[in-house]
Amino acid sequence: MSTRLASGGRLIDRSKQVQFTFNGKQMRGHAGDTLASALLANDQMMVGRSFKYHRPRGIVASGAEEPNALINMGEGARFEPNQRATTTELFNGLVAQSQNHWPSLEFDIGAVNTYFSRFLPAGFYYKMFMYPRAFWKHVYEPFIRQSAGLGRAPKQRDQDTYEHFYHFADLVVIGGGVAGLQAALAAATAGQSVLVIEQTADWGGRAPVDGVADDSTIDGMDADAWVAQAVAKLDAMDNVTMRTRTMGAGVYDHGYLLAYERLRDHAPEAKGPRHRLWRIRTKQIVTATGAIERPLSFAGNDLPGVMLAAALRDYVVNYGVSTGDRTVVVTNNDDAYRTAIVLKQAGLEVPVIIDARPEGGGALMAKARDMGIRVDTGRAIAKVKGGKRVTGVQICAQAGEGSVLEEIPCDAVAMSGGWSPVVHLWSHCGGKLIWDDAQAHFRPDPSRPPTGASGEGFVIAAGSANGALALDAALADATAAGVAAARAAGGTPDDAPPPKADALGEAALAPVWMMPQGANIKLRMKSWLDFQNDVKVSDVQLAAHEGFESVEHAKRYTTLGMATDQGKLSNINGLAILSDALGQPIPVTGTTTFRPPYTPISMGAIAGEARGEIFQPLRRTPMHDWHDANGADWEPVGHWRRPYAFVRNGETVNEAVMREVRNTREKLGLLDASTLGKLIVKGPDAGRFLDMMYTNMMSTLKPGKCRYGLMCSENGFLSDDGVVARIDDDTWLCHTTTGGADRIHAHMEEWLQTEWWDWKVYVANVTEQLAQVAVVGPNARKLLEKLGGMDVSREALGFMEWADGTLGGFDARVYRISFSGELSYEVAVPASQGRAFWDKLMEAGKEFGVMPYGTEALHIMRAEKGFIMIGDETDGTVIPQDLGLDWALSKKKEDYLGKRAQQRSHMTDPNRWKLVGLETVDGSVLPDGAYALGNGVNENGQKVMIGRVTSTYHSPTLNRGIAMGLVLHGPDRMGEVLDFPGTDGKTYKAKIVSAVFYDPEGEKQNV
Amino acid sequence: MKRYSAFAIAREAARYHSGWERAWRSPEPKRKYDVIIVGAGGHGLATAYYLGKNFGITNVAVIEKGWLGGGNTGRNTTIIRSNYLQDPSAAIYEKSRSLYETMSQDLNYNVMFSPRGVIMLAQTHHEVRGYQRTAHANALQGVTTEFITPQKVKELVPIINLAGPRYPVLGGLWQARGGTARHDAVAWGYARACSDMGMDIIQKCEVTGVRRDGGRVAGVDTTKGPIDCDKLGIVVAGHSGVLADMAGFRLPIESVALQALVSEPIKPCMDVVVMANTVHGYMSQSDKGEMVIGGGADGYNNYTQRGSFHHIEETVRALIETFPMVSRLKMLRQWGGIVDMTGDRSPILSKTPVDGVFINCGWGTGGFKAIPGSGWGMAELIAKGRSPLTDAFSLDRFKEGRFIDESVAAGVAH
Ligand SMILES: Cc1cc2nc3c(=O)[nH]c(=O)nc-3n(C[C@H](O)[C@H](O)[C@H](O)COP(=O)(O)OP(=O)(O)OC[C@H]3O[C@@H](n4cnc5c(N)ncnc54)[C@H](O)[C@@H]3O)c2cc1C
């Protein structure tokens, strides 16, 4: 059984007990435990089920590479699936539940899959479930979906907060093991800013654990002491920032680095954000990210109780936890001997060390033998015995096919297939790898680093992440890396010698990809590569056999490396098997692509603070609160909210709209027009520039005058419209649509910056500087005159003119323009005065029957007048000529944006659909977006269409449905009745009429 | 070719799967082919497949510089729908969608087409009107779609937040027979069928030049030597501009990185595909349980298959707004593909200025769904010189101003 040892555990505090539950069972651990070490201490070996066969799964690793120990954690708004127990720090009240089983962890129905595993090899689902056709959607797929997936889906809204953090550093060292610390020490002497980050809660990495077996020292100190003084030194330097629980997540172009800090995962009740995403700009990155141990591929290597040798040792040394009483060690290298030695020192039994190398190892083997541990060389595990946990191993010759020589009872197996440098961060942005034959792993190729803007490399690997696995080599490599990084970042670091390390030397490893070497198919079908996704040696071989020869094909066909550990344990073993099957060297096979993040990071952290109300912050006009308090039914328009209508008690929204239209046409309406875009265009070349931007001539507009302008894209399509006012000789004010302000501003800037960069023009977006109110209706002038101030008479301020002055004491700019067909003024006041001005208008307007109106009333009134609306009559495919706006296309100008495009054959095609008015025969309202039906079908079998509705309303003024539409040869077909099939099954009949339904002579607005 | 079936699996299980054939051969190139297709993505392979199946042209090579299906075909978020607005688009996408319905049986390869339904959320009045318009058009185009209420949206997607403070859900355009398929399987299924018809799929072979004889194509230069052909189909997505340059003409195409990401797998919680175009995010759940999330395209042109992280941030924010539970999932992996964008965001399936050279590109952010339909039309175009499915997508349209603009109805077009 696995249990807490009586002593030991450098990371735990035995005086502090911590309570937690696993699958409802109360358990106890200590402060400093991870959830994984605490589970082991409570003899909870089995912690989950695998993905495909629902096989029992135990903890196999002690860090970020863990593929098995994934749990549903927390409750309610704090619930989160797929938390890795090995990287979860224990806290009081932690609630953990195992995943992917039904009804329980011990008895899982899905486990029958394992008996059918022979029928479920790699890619089986591509070959079956095809018949009968309907079964995929209704039977097979729902079944597969239910049995797939791991943790449960969270249900509630996340109550935690997250934040983003910007950081600038000359150098960032990723990894706080001895190599990372040493690299930082070496680099920091240059005085540049250095950030050192470590993903776990503790500095020091592997060295303090590995040193135990060796009695190793660094500069005469044990590793813990050396780490403590190194951290103290770094902490004391002003130019160094240190962060634990912070993982290097991704390396992006030009030295952009993402780090993920877990602030409160270990203390969920504490205040503050849960995670913090660091967005770092740096000159040089040192990846001292260590190495990950590889499993060995033997039959039954997936049973709970089979663990990575170094992980087993971690649990003993760091947490005082034993995984088993009798542990068989199996290895192809010297490092695993350290585990045997540590176990023996802790008083646990190691019946045998099985070393696949014919000659065995070096000094560490000698030490183990001296301690009385049996070492068998040239041997292998033929098969691990057991069901839900290991009960023994069968030993065979590594060179053979698996005939059993001996069976040894045990309750744990420590395996080691050698070490692979963590090259993820090096690789994210294009760093290349080379194959190291001696150590049988890929490591960073220093001659092909990821390169930044200058073409120079910006990542340097250090220590075991660079393939320097031995302690002295790692420290020397890290020193050099730190110095090199500081130099590359422009500093002059001191040239200090690396610390002196004294550890036992290691004999060479022998690559072992299959155990035993000649394992037969039955064993290969039981030898796991990917524990979570249930990919076995036989699966990869089958992929190769079927022609999935590219490593990417093999990965996708078998799902190798696609689990939540992204192949941290399985990839190298898998591609070695693939290479062998294809008869080619491993480097020819190559690796799959390393993609960020290094380990999964929370979506909450990625989103940061911007959620809820401040996800795309809402823009509010100065009158927003008044609207809100007065019945506004809000409509999102761009980033703004605009009142759709102001609904009174007892009224429906539609009734409100009708009332607003009638009141405005009969008396007086106020519209908050502040959201309309207002761009100032200024400079000696402004007129010339606007002549290019607009289809109309703007340079000849006189100061004091307004003109309705159209803007087209360079492809000729109508993109925006609005009234332009000439303010003075070199200043124009351009109104845009509400949604168009930012877009048109950017559009103008783009042309100014890329095409006409030498023209003297500035554009400023002053939309938010001004509050604007449309005062509309027969009583409009009376209201303004009542306010007093500037002369707004017909004579002083004619239609399409503007003037500056004061109104009721407010500084005002008044435009006489109309989008409703009524007598209308648009009054702009400074934004800070907007609300007061609005209040004043409402107050003073009472006697004239004033009422505010919303966007829908605005739309109806403009449609009654036949005015087009950008976004309704236009959709990016419509040109001004389609809308009968030819009058706004200047014939005098040599050029404007869109002019040339509008001369293309399709643009001048007489068969383009043209704007008309539409009146239903029965007075009802045409459905929005309905199409007019033509005759027959086209070559692709689609019914022929000859027109469509672009806007449609009930007009309270005419008391009938009115619509605008684009119709084939429309203006030539006045009076014709067209069929518009609705999606409601009805066909609507509508007559083609003029689009101007109200006051065609313009008598009302020009008074 | 030995057929795949549950019986075949049982048979092979008895002999430890030693009897399976290669899914496709790995031949050396011949000296000459009737037709060469450059690019073994979905579109290239489907073109080859229908050349053989519909026109009996099987002396065909598909030349691929990497591994087949390794371009955008193997990187996309696999949304399949045909609720497009414009007639030519609706025609080719609906043809495609209908071919997906029977693709597994046609190819004897389970491509896992899952008609689980696609919802495009309407979150502004403008979008509501746009989708109502699309629904009207679709009805006449023979595409079954429906504009649904927020309540129906909620029934279909229990994890959705209808009353987002920023953009409430006002309805949605629902295509019940839209869905997803397994992207790799589509490429592999076509490759296996092509290989079975005797076509050569030549992987790890890069086309480096297009050889002409006067105004006509004569063949290609490759990293495995020159190969002759009568007709050449260029189907290379993000690298179309490069290939066109080799053939001596220019294309109105820009190449940008488009990104996607997946969460760790969880138990089923969303059966349909949801696209939220106002906030720019879309999501579905794969059969494996991962939430598959599509991101935005970079604003600058490039050929690195990575993309910038701030787009991921924007996408994830949009999704948390739409599906609050996403906040407590983790991002497992992010990646990018190079998409080929035209000015009107619609594809090009066309003859070219060089006689005998045909081009199929410009599928941009949304061509996975089009693979079978595009292959069908492209094969007809190559074999007969024209196809009603591809007519409107000719290169001339940029000269004539005859754009096929879909952004009308939806901001993004996945
Ligand atoms: C992140 C992302 C998400 C997407 N989501 C969706 C979605 O949900 N739904 C949807 O319908 N579409 C989606 N798409 C778009 C879709 O993936 C593509 O439109 C489609 O896959 C294009 O297929 P293809 O065969 O044209 O291109 P590819 O699959 O890219 O194939 C082109 C092939 O040409 C090869 N090639 C290039 N140059 C040469 C040369 N010189 N010699 C030989 N071979 C060459 C390449 O290696 C490549 O294999 C998405 C795309 C991306 C990137």
Image: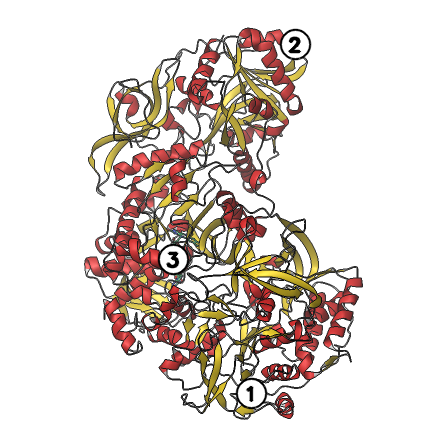
Element class at badge 1: loop
Residue receiving disc 1: A351
Of the image marks 2 and 1, the number of the one nearer the N terminus: 1
- Determine whether A825 is above or below A715 in the image: above
Quadrant of the drawing holding the N terminus of chain A: bottom right
> Would residue A592 be found to the left or right of residue A976 on screen?
right
Query: Alpha carbon of mark 2 to alpha carbon of mark 1: how far?
Result: 103 Å
Foreground pick, A474 / A148: A148
Count residues near mark 3 (Cα–Cα under 10 Å), then give few for <14, some for 14-19, many for 20+. Answer: some
Total tally of numbered discs in the picture = 3
Image coords of residue A398 (percent x, y) = 46, 89
Image coords of residue A624 (percent x, y) = 58, 26
User: Residue visible at 38% across and 64% down?
Assistant: A109
Res. A789 mark: 2
Q: Chain of mark 1?
A: A
Determine if residue A873 is in view. Answer: yes
Indicate the quadrant of ligand 1 in the picture.
bottom left
Residue receiving disc 3: A146
Here the colouring is secondary structure
Query: Alpha carbon of mark 1 to alpha carbon of mark 3: how far?
Result: 43 Å
Q: Is mark 1 within 8 Å of ligand 1?
A: no
Determine if residue B362 is in view. Answer: no
